[in-house]
Structures are given as structure tokens and as C-alpha cells.
Amino acid sequence: MNSTVERQVREYYDHAGPAYHALMGQFWHHGDLAAEQAGLSPEDAAKALARKQVEAANLRAGQTALDFGSGVGGTTVHMAELSGANVVGISNNEWLSAEARRYAAERGMGDRVAFLTVGDEDYKTLTAWPDASLDMVSFYESVCHLPEKGAFFEAAFRVLKPGARLVGVDWIRRPFGERRTEEEIAPFVRPVEEVISIPRLGSLEEYRDAMAAAGFVVEVAEDLFPGVECWGSTPPDDGQGWGEYSGERETVIHAGKRVLDAARAAGVFSVGRWVARR
């Protein structure tokens, strides 16, 4: 079985993980647009979006959830704190998992939150979890790295209990302004894919259709930045210091900022949100 792409993602986070942690702290995903517009910090806006997903899933105390692509654990721990549920975060990079365990321990959540490092292709089956055993599966800007997204959605469908929900937030490509066709979008999207180890940036509709094909009833499929450029916590003035970052393979981090800025400015990069019922 060829896991070249998945291995590249794991290796990408060997250097990107420390950079992201230094620049963004524990919360790496975009936040709720209304929260951002109200002046909340990137972390608080990210927490507001996580709360919206936990509430959409109706996750409660005593239940069990799986967070796919849990990074350094900020959102995974926050979801457990909000809900009272037990949450397991998984990634294929042990550096990320170790940092996440440390954070959970600091928050006093080591008894209800665990972080596991899984194999590069384990997302296709999630065989560590029995059928109909989980009350929520979540992902935050992680499925974009998967070459076989449909396989992940099929696995998530299998492990969720009937009536339980898959909730997700992820990077997407979209038509915007005068750029409507794939040929017009591609010059901005392809560099993002190449630099940030994304096999193919999906669209809002492609995610929705893949979830439906796996058996889900898709209740929400929305662009979180409709009609506006999606800058989130990384504005073009680079207040976070991406362009000045100094560390292992820093040129990749600088290039990532540059190509993302171009895609954001063109409007063809955005973030989607989904809620799908088993």
C-alpha cells in the first residue's frame, strides 16, 4: 500500500508543528467570523467555533468523542471542557501528540482527554474503534491533508452511533469574484497544495457529497466567510510574525504564508463547516 502522501504530511509537521505552536499557540484553526468581527482574539474566536460544533453535535458529559487531526490539543481539550465528555485526539505525528498530552496535563484534563499517534493510513478504517461506539467525530482543518477523504468519512460513519454526528471545519477552494472556473482558481490553489502538503483542496460541495455518499445526512454545509476574503487570524500585515519566523526549514513556513496570502487575497481560499448525522 502506497502511503507516500500521508508520510509527507507526517514529515511536514515535524517542522511545521513547532512553527505553528510558536506562532499560534494551542489553537491552530480559523475562528467564528462573528467573534472575529466583535474583536475577540484568534484563540477566543477559535473557541467560539469549537463551541458551535460541540453544541451542534449535542455532545454531553459521559459520552465519548474522537477528534481527528488533533494537533497540539487545544481544541480537543476545549471540547472536553465544554461538554464534560471524554475525547480522544489522534494524529500521525508523535511530536504533536506529545505536546497535546503535555497541554492536557497542564489543564488537569489527563483523565478525560487522551492523544494517540496512529499510522499514516489508519484514517481509512479507524479500526481501533468498534462499530457504533462514538458519540461524535470531529475534525478541524485536517482532512484537507488526506488523499482519500471519502475513506475517512466512511470510517467515521461506521464508528458513530446512530443519530450521532460528524462535525468538521476545513480549508476549501471556491469561485470568487471574477475567478469562477477551475482554470482561474488553480494558479492560486496549487501552490498552497504543494507547499503545505495537501493532495487536493476540496470544495464545500465535494465534502458534502462525500459525506452523503458515506451514508450521512448532511445538516449543515456552509462557507464560514461567505462573500468576503478569508483572512481569519493571519491578516496580510503579518502581526503573528510568519514572515520573520526563524527555525527548522523556515523557508517552507515563509513560503506557506506567501502562497496562502495570495489565495486569500484572490478570494478563492476559504474555510467550510459541516454537520452530518449518522
Image (tube, helix red, strand yellow):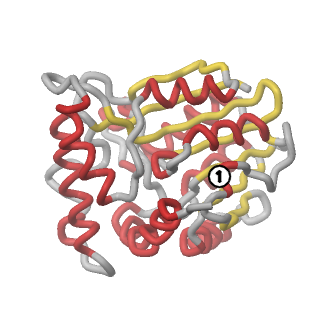
Reading the image, the residue beneath label 1 is 123
Query: Residue 264 in the image: x percent, y percent?
Result: 22, 41
Q: Residue at x 63, y 42 (%)?
A: 151
Q: Residue at x 37, y 48 (%)?
A: 42
| Residue 60 in view of the camera | no
Q: Quadrant of the N terminus?
A: bottom right
Between 157 and 87, the one nearer to me in the picture: 157
Please rate how many residues cluster around mark 1, counting C-alpha atoms within 10 Å: few if below 14, some from 14 to 19, many from 20: many
Quadrant location of residue 53? top right
- The one nearer the camera, 30 or 118, is 118
Three-letter amino acid code of the residue under disc 1: Tyr
Which image quarter: residue 69?
bottom right
Q: Position of residue 171 (x, y in %)?
A: 40, 41
Looking at the rendered image, the quarter that the C terminus falls into is top right
Q: Residue 152, position in %: x, y?
A: 63, 43
Point 21% across, 23% down: residue: 180
- Residue 87 position, x and y percent, is 72, 51
**Residue 217 seen by the camera:** yes
> Which residue is rendered at x = 63% and y = 55% of the image?
77
Would residue 86 appear left or right of 102 to someone viewing this image?
right
109 over 76 or under it: above or below = below
